[in-house]
Image (cartoon, helix red, strand yellow):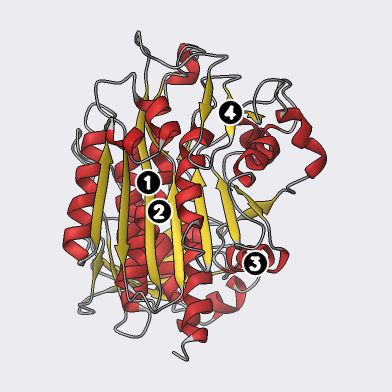
């Protein structure tokens, strides 16, 4: 169990979460000491403000916390690091406790691989009910995703990332295979090989499987570019600073796989991760090169910094070969997605309307926001090439997230349900429940959707 959680309720301090509208009625019911303390301390209950209520001996007996809406569980996300160390329990309706527990746990996260924690976290009592394992599963999986993203490339290159995936598979009884280096050419994964061949850390494709093969097939594909220099179309230094996070899509699909396996969802899970470093050397791929992809589609390289879609193309071709029930790919694919929806919203594309609407609904329920953009066929011509079947980059800067998604669509048949996520995976600054640094985006929504869909299908 994470240090921010406990099941021991003894001497736990209640946290009363209340809105400004309900505060006057609550205050009337309090004893004189509480009223005097709040008055003398000048406390004004507003969203995000809290007060530590003492007894006559000066010990904390209760925490009063203001929120604009009791359903806004993220509002308490800073409490783990600003409350005094101790044991706490939320005084809220039980229906909200799981979400509050998740927000508390995620707010307690600190990346401590290279630096000591700033302070110890307060502890939250988890109720021993049906939500207990759900809270633990969610928070622990997202911690792992954040850790993977936050780790710099010298400790999380292709070899190290593959090692993390192998350890995960071993822990959970999944099978995993790797195709490494020139074997990618022998096995016909030319795009993955081309993007990663310039690095001294060989490119590879990870192929993880778990579950009963008779269950519905769900395949996850994650972009695993462990560092992106941009290649010969090199990025400016300011754009390269966060490129350790360009493997966040790969981290996300591993995190989602962990959530699925911990919950023992009745699906046949496959996870495909192309893992590369887009580096520069004498054998780096060049603008103007032509690659024949695994599917046989010829690709003209318009920009070596549009490498993520290349490795995903081969992985998606393999993903759809088994005609799964659902394919989900996740990537930090375009800067255009951030221009479109900012850094806090997951951008999604899908070839099926009902599927997309259901996932967005789960995003709303989990306060894990998702926005859908169209696969607008009219923009496909921006990817035309005069010497190949397609160009990997549009020649203009408009609708970049859409044209990137349209590129991927070339490798996914219309009859296979498909979700494509283009995400930031990074908090530029700390917010309640979301510390600065690597972030899991869309995972809680996707897991909620998968849990509902496949539990219902199997009568669970």
> Whole-Å distance between the Cαs marked 4 and 3?
30 Å
Camera-nearest residue between 390 and 355: 390
Q: Residues within 10 Å of mark 4 (few under 14, many from 20)?
A: many
Query: Which quarter of the figure has residue 401?
Result: top right
Query: Which label's residue is closer to the chain start, 3 or 1?
Result: 1
Under tag 2, what secondary structure? helix
Residue 145 percent location from the top left of the image: 35, 49
- Above or below — where is 421 with respect to 116? below
Under tag 4, what secondary structure? strand
Query: Which label's residue is closer to the chain start, 2 or 3?
Result: 2
Query: Which label's residue is closer to the chain start, 4 or 2?
Result: 2
List the residue tagged with mark 1.
Answer: 273
Residue 355 image label: 3
Q: Residues within 10 Å of mark 1 (few under 14, many from 20)?
A: many
| Residue 445 can be seen, yes or no | no
List the residue tagged with mark 2.
Answer: 253
Is 410 displayed left or right of 331 in the figure?
right
Under tag 1, what secondary structure? strand
């Amino acid at each position: 169990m994470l240090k921010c959680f406990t099941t021991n309720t003894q001497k736990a301090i209640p946290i009363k979460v209340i809105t400004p509208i309900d505060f006057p009625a609550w205050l009337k019911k309090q004893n004189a000491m509480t009223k005097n303390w709040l008055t003398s301390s000048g406390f004004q209950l507003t969203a995000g403000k809290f007060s530590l209520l003492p007894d006559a001996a000066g010990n904390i007996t209760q925490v009063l916390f203001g929120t604009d809406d009791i359903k806004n569980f993220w509002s308490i996300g800073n409490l783990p690091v600003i409350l005094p160390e101790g044991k706490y329990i939320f005084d809220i309706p039980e229906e909200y406790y799981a979400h509050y527990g998740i927000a508390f746990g995620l707010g307690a996260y600190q990346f401590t691989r290279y630096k000591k924690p700033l302070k110890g976290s307060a502890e939250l009592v988890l109720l021993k009910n049906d939500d207990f394992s759900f809270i633990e599963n969610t928070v622990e999986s997202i911690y792992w995703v954040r850790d993977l993203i936050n780790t710099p490339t010298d400790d999380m290159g292709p070899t190290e990332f593959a090692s993390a995936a192998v350890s995960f598979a071993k822990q959970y009884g999944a099978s995993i295979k790797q195709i490494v280096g020139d074997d990618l050419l022998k096995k016909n994964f030319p795009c993955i090989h081309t993007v990663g061949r310039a690095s001294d850390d060989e490119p590879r494709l990870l192929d993880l499987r778990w579950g009963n093969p008779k269950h519905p097939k769900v395949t996850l594909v994650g972009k695993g570019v462990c560092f992106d220099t941009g290649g010969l179309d090199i990025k400016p230094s300011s754009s390269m600073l966060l490129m350790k996070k360009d493997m966040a899509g790969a981290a996300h699909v591993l995190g989602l796989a962990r959530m699925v396996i911990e919950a023992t969802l009745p699906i046949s899970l496959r996870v495909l991760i192309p893992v590369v470093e887009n580096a520069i050397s004498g054998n780096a791929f060049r603008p103007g090169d032509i690659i024949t992809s695994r599917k046989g589609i010829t690709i003209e390289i318009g920009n070596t910094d549009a490498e993520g879609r290349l490795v995903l193309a081969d992985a998606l071709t393999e993903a759809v070969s088994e005609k799964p029930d659902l394919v989900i790919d996740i990537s930090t694919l375009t800067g255009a997605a951030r221009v479109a929806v900012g850094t806090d919203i997951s951008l999604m594309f899908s070839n099926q309307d009902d599927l997309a609407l259901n996932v967005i609904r789960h995003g709303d329920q989990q306060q894990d926001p998702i926005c859908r953009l169209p696969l607008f066929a009219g923009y496909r011509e921006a990817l035309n090439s005069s010497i190949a079947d397609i160009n990997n980059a549009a020649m203009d800067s408009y609708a970049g997230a859409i044209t990137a998604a349209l590129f991927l669509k070339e490798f996914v048949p219309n009859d296979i349900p498909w979700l494509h996520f283009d995400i930031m995976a990074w908090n530029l600054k700390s917010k309640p429940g979301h510390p600065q640094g690597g972030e899991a985006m869309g995972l809680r929504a996707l897991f909620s959707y998968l849990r509902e869909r496949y539990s219902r299908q199997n009568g669970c």
